[in-house]
Amino acid sequence: MAALGYILIGLFGLSFVWFIIEKRRRRTHPVQGGIDRSISLPHTEPLELYSNSFSHCSRKCRLVIAELGLTAKHHSIDLIETGWYQTISPAYLKINPSGLVPTLVHNGHPVFESDDILAYAAELAGSHAPSLIPDSSELQSRMQDWLDFCTISSADAMAGMETKAGACIPGLTLPMFVSTIQYVPLRNILVGFLFHFDKKRPALFTASKLLGLRRIMALKPLQKMMHRSRDHMRAHLQTLDEALARSDGDWILGEQFSLADITLSCLLLRLEETGWLSWFEQTSHIKQVTDYYDRLQSRPAWTQAISDHAHPIVTRAKIDLSSAVAADPSLGERIYGAAQSPAQTPKEAFSW
């Protein structure tokens, strides 16, 4: 009996030592946007992109690289919603100490933060590549406004949703998160309680795994969060629709396709795969937005950057979510809310 006790104490001690070592190896810290030339990483190609197939910001960067005709080696990095917490693995933290995706590596030096990656890639491509940044300062300013409009803050993802469509995305993605997590082993999710810097994520995903879509969507605080995001997003889509109607070309700034169109396309993709875009089409006047999204998807870069990087978990979860809502109208009402006619859609003051 005493021997068993010593064995248990020894195992506990070894486990504790392992945890301390792993905790130190997985330590994260914020990084500055842009290139960090003080860091030199192993690489086999001049340009390498570490991204996640479902990540909103990763998609923007893959689209920019494809649109510019740049050649980059792609590294697929998992988030927990696509399998496991690879972003906080010791190997990835050597590439990006913040534990976030995407990261662009140029000649061994990492470039952090998605909007900085967009600008860096556009400059790197040079004058021979299609220009994604307008020449005039006025159009550059308008482009920056649209980039800010779609921004998702890494510090507080839902901050500023009154003026930023990007801040509405996390709340509207919740049903999709719940659907993807059903394909992820619980043990992978629980690792987040040990090492992830934001304990709310493993808590939410554990609850999602255990409760499932129908029961977790019945929770009033989550419904309130989604519907607040929905109401602000409806107003933002109307702002976008009106801007497209005033545009003198196919794109948001007119004839020139720009970084603004790329970031808007990723926002619309997220709304489409979560079922929200269809809901907004039925409850709001956004015909200009719908046609614009069709044009965005028809570009060759879309196939290279989005379709070719589809994740099987995300593909299955999208089908599961759509099927569950179709089979249970009450679930659809919990997620999307009671249907409204376009005439009832509220307007939100916004100036461009």
Image (spheres, rainbow, N blue to C red):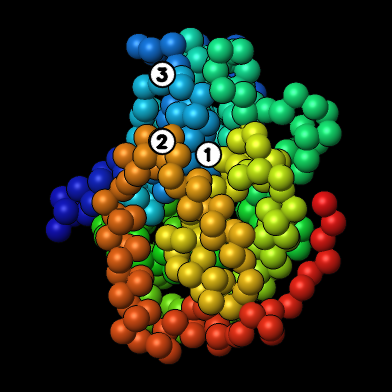
Q: Going 49% across and 83% down the picture, which residue do you hit?
A: 334
Amino acid type, residue under disc 2 in the picture: Pro
Q: Going 67% across and 60% down the picture, which residue do you hit?
A: 241
Q: Quadrant of the N terminus?
A: bottom left
Contact between labelled residues 1 and 2, with CB atoms less than 8 Å apart: no
In-front residue for pair 23/9 = 23
Marked residue nearer the N-terminal end (2 or 1): 1
Q: Is residue 343 visible?
A: yes
Say which quarter of the image contains residue 340: bottom right
Residue 71: assigned label: 3
Marked residue nearer the N-terminal end (3 or 1): 1
Which residue is identified by label 1? 60
Q: Going 52% across and 53% down the picture, which residue do you hit?
A: 293
Q: Tell me the crowding category of disc 3: few under 14, some 14 to 19, or many 20 or more residues within 10 angstroms, Cα based.
A: few
Q: Going 53% across and 77% down the picture, which residue do you hit?
A: 282
Residue 111: assigned label: none
Counting from the top left corner in percent of width and height, residue 76 is at 35, 35
Structural distance between the alpha carbons of marks 2 and 1: 15 Å
Marked residue nearer the N-terminal end (3 or 2): 3
Q: What element carries label 1?
A: helix
User: Of circles 3 and 2, which is in front?
Assistant: 2
* Number of residue marks: 3
Amino acid type, residue under disc 1 in the picture: Lys
Residue 300: assigned label: 2
Structural distance between the alpha carbons of marks 3 and 2: 15 Å
Structural distance between the alpha carbons of marks 3 and 1: 16 Å
Q: Is residue 168 above or below residue 115?
A: below
Contact between labelled residues 2 and 3, with CB atoms less than 8 Å apart: no
Counting from the top left corner in percent of width and height, residue 176 is at 42, 64
